Image: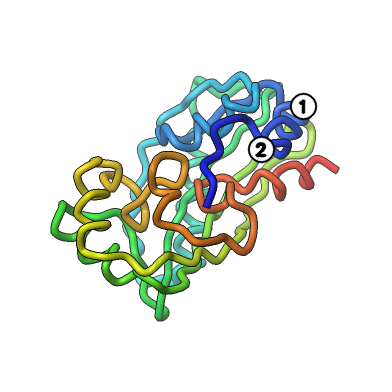
Amino acid sequence: MQRYNEPTELQLEFSKAYPSLVLASSSPNRRGLLEKGGSKVTVFSPDVDEERHNMTPVEAMLSIAEAKLNAYLNSPAFDENLPAIAADTLVMIDDILIGKPKDEEDARAILSHLSGRTQTVYTATGLYIPGKGADVFIDSADVIFYKLSQSDIDSYIATGEWSGAAGGYRLQKTGHNLVERIEGDWTTVVGLPLKMLINKLA
């Protein structure tokens, strides 16, 4: 799969729709996704409980995205004139949730499990639009991995990109080399469904 070295048409379209916004997330991947298209991003780092207490995966994701957004909306930093976005991303395979690896050993096990198979990446998004209020929604995309050798996995682990990444890889960096194809919006895999966000302004 290609690496997106230059801003894509989708990223440029998003920046026209959202020239300035608040990102209620400390994720460098999400920030980079937006800034690459030209959006001016103000980061707010929400302090919320991300534990998934006796909820279905979808319920938990929507709850966390909403909590992140509300943390910003109820803070002194809130600017009612700027759109605001928060998100939560998870990977599922065989009805099992895959979050962020705890350590290298965990990352290696996750990538071995994903090798040659299809995973579904879900991103729940909280969105505030000035004059319209707040909404929470979810999008998904299927990611098909190449069959990975142990050497492939070891080489990727050595990059350190697995740390802090749902599923143990970062699509925007060298993680794209692990992926044969994506069925759905690639930005959903990175952590923000840009197509859906653009449509929300229509």
Is any part of residue 12 visible from this angle? yes
Farthest-out residue, right:
202
Give me the residue at 71% from left, 34% from top. Answer: 14
- Quarter of the rendering occupied by the C terminus: top right
Q: Secondary structure at mark 2?
A: strand
Q: What residue type is disc 2 on?
A: Tyr
Residue at the spot of label 2 = 128
Q: What residue type is disc 1 on?
A: Lys
Q: How is the image coloured?
A: rainbow
The part of the image, by quadrant, that contains residue 150 is bottom left
Give me the residue at 77% from left, 31% from top. Answer: 17
Q: Is residue 56 above or below residue 3?
A: below
Q: Position of residue 122 (x, y in %)?
A: 52, 61
Q: Position of residue 112 (x, y in %)?
A: 26, 68
Q: Secondary structure at mark 1?
A: helix
Q: Position of residue 110 (x, y in %)?
A: 27, 64
Give me the residue at 47% from left, 72% from top. Answer: 118
Please name whichever residue, 181 or 17, is drawn nearer the observer in this view of the structure. Answer: 181
Residue at the spot of label 1 = 16
Sequence order check: which comes first, mark 2 or mark 1?
1
Please name whichever residue, 3 or 20, is drawn nearer the observer in this view of the structure. Answer: 3
Q: CA distance from mark 2 to mark 1?
A: 17 Å
Is any part of residue 74 visible from this angle? no
Q: Are marks 2 and 1 in contact (CB under 8 Å)?
A: no
Please name whichever residue, 24 or 75, is drawn nearer the observer in this view of the structure. Answer: 24
